[in-house]
Amino acid sequence: MTRTLFMVLACAAAALSSASCGGTDKGNRSTGGGDTGSGDAGGSDASGGDVNGSDASGGATSGTGAQPGSGQQFSVDAQGATFTAEDGFTIDVPPGAVSEDTVITIERIDEAPEGAVGPMYVLGPEGLTFARPITLTLPITVELKAELGENTVLGAYGFTAQEGSDDFAPLARHDVSRDSVVTETDRLSRIYPGMILPTPMASQHRYPSALAADESFLYFASGGTEDVATGDNNDGFIYRVRLGTAEPEAMIPADPDPKALWVDGSHVYWASGGDDDPVIPSALRRVDKASLEVETLAQVGYVVSVIGDASALYFGDGDGGNIYTMPLDGGEPVVLASDAGRPAYLAQDAENLYWTGGAATNKVYKVAKSGGEVTVIADDEAEPAGIAVDAEFVYWANAGDGGVFKAPIAGGQKTLVHQGSSMSGLALRGSTLFSTDTRGNRSVNAHDLESNRTVLLAFGQPVPWRVIAPEGQGVFWSNAGDYRYQGQVASYHAP
C-alpha cells in the first residue's frame, strides 16, 4: 500500500508569512518546496503548475502565496480556504465552516477499496465536523480498456466511512466529469472516488442470457450450475430469484437451450431452443408461476425470441426468418412477417412490433400487430441486436460497429446515441436508455436521452449480454462469463 502525506497550509491573509502557517518572509523559499517569490498571491513559480493563482510541487492554497508540500499543514480559519494537491485533489472550505483556526491533514492511499476509481484520502483529524459542508474534488485515475466518448463519464461517487468503520457509503453530491468527481461532506474521514458495485443475484451459472421481471421476482434462463449439470450441454433451466436476494430456484425441469423470456401476471413464457440429439423440436412454452405446471404452446422452426401483451404472444423463428403471433393460451401461429432475418430481439408498443434482423439482414423493422406491410426502419446496419421503442423513436444496438442509434418511428435519418465497442442488450425506462457492451470496457451504460450524456454504471463485467430496467426497480443484466459456469445475473441500484 502506497501512502503519501500532504500536511498543507492554507492560512488567512493576515497570517501569510507567519512561521506557524508554514510560510516564510518575502523573498524566502517555503520549507514545503516551491518559490514564494515576492509573497504575493499568484506570484510564485514552481514545477507543480499554476493552480488557483499559486504554483507548487506539493499543492496550493488560494489567495495565500504559500507553497504547501510534504510535511506542512493545511490550516484554515473562519474566512475559509482552498487547497489543491498536485494530483488534482482539492479541499474547498467555505467561510463560516469553522469558527477558529483549524489544522487539516491529508494522507493519500493509492490502494483504495473495491470499486475505487482513484486514490483514497484520509482527512484528519477524523471525525471533525463543519458548520457548512466542505467541497472535495476527487481525481479519477482508473485506466479503462477503451477511451470514454466526449459525452460519457463514469458513474462515480465520493465514498466515505465514519471513523473506525469500514462501511463506506456514497455521498449525495456527485458532479462527475471525465477526470474527477466533486462531492461534499461535513465531516473529516476517509474518502475516495468509487463506483456503486452491482449486487450478484445469481453466480456460477452457465451462460445466463434472457431476463424478465415482475413485482416480486427476477427471471432468467441459463444452462444451470455445475452441480445440476445433466450431461447434455444443450440443457438449461428457467430460474426465478426474489428481488433483493441471491437464492435462485429452478422453475422447470431441464429443457433444451432456453433462450428468451416474457412474463405476465400468471405465467413465464420462454423460447425452447430444441435439440438435434435426440431430435427435440424447438417450441414456445410457458410455466405457471403458482403451480409450476409446464405447457407447450407451439412447436415451430427455431424459436429465438418472445414478447407479448394482454391478448397475444409474438415470437421470432430464427430458422424460417418469420415473426409469428398467437393467442396467449395457445393456438395456431400466424405469420406476421416473413424474411425477418434472425429476429432474436423484439420490442413493442400498443400498435406495432419491432425487431432487428441481426447479421442475417442487418436491418431494423416494424410491423403492425394486426398484420400488414413490413417497414424497414434502418438498413445496412452492423449486426443489429438489442432494440427498444418509445412514443417517437426506435433505438437499437449494433454488435458490429458498437453504435447505439435511434430513428423516428415514422421514418427518417438515424442518430448516434452512444459509441461503444460491441453493443448487445437495450432497455428503456422513461428518458434513460440502458445498454450493454460486450467488448471494450465491458460496460453497462445509462444514456440520458434529454441531455445526451452517457454514464457507465459498471465496467469490467464478464461479458454483459441482456439488460432490463423495470419501472420502479433497479437495473438488471446477465453476464455470460468468459468461461463455462462463470456467468452471473446482477442488479444495480443508484443511491
Image: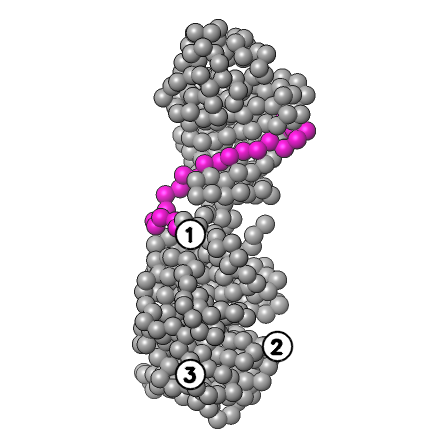
Q: Is residue 420 above or below residue 307?
A: above
Mark 1 → mark 3, Cα distance in angstroms: 37 Å
Proximity of marks 3 and 2: CB atoms separated by less than 8 Å: no
Dividing the picture into quarters, in which one does residue 47 lie? Answer: top left
* Residue toward you, 67 or 267: 67
Mark 2 → mark 1, Cα distance in angstroms: 34 Å
Disc assigned to residue 265 = 2
Left or right: 276 with respect to 208?
A: left
Proximity of marks 1 and 3: CB atoms separated by less than 8 Å: no
Label 1 secondary element? loop
**Residue type at the position of mark 2:** Gly
Q: Which badge, 1 or 3, comes first in the chain's sequence?
A: 3
Left or right: 228 with respect to 399?
A: right
Quickly name the residue at label 1.
459
Quickly name the residue at label 3.
374
Mark 3, residues whose alpha carbon is within 10 Å: few (<14), some, or many (≥20)? some
Q: Is residue 132 magenta?
A: yes
Identify which residue is drawn at 65% across, 23% down.
98
Left or right: 486 with respect to 390?
A: left
* Residue toward you, 56 or 466: 56
Residue at the outermost front position: 412
Q: Which badge, 3 or 2, comes first in the chain's sequence?
A: 2
Q: Position of residue 189 (x, y in %)?
A: 57, 31
Identify which residue is drawn at 68% across, 29% down.
131
State the extent of the magenta-drawn residues as a range: 126-149
**Residue type at the position of mark 1:** Phe
* Residue toward you, 483 or 398: 398
Report the mark closest to the observer, 1 or 3: 3
**Residue type at the position of mark 3:** Val
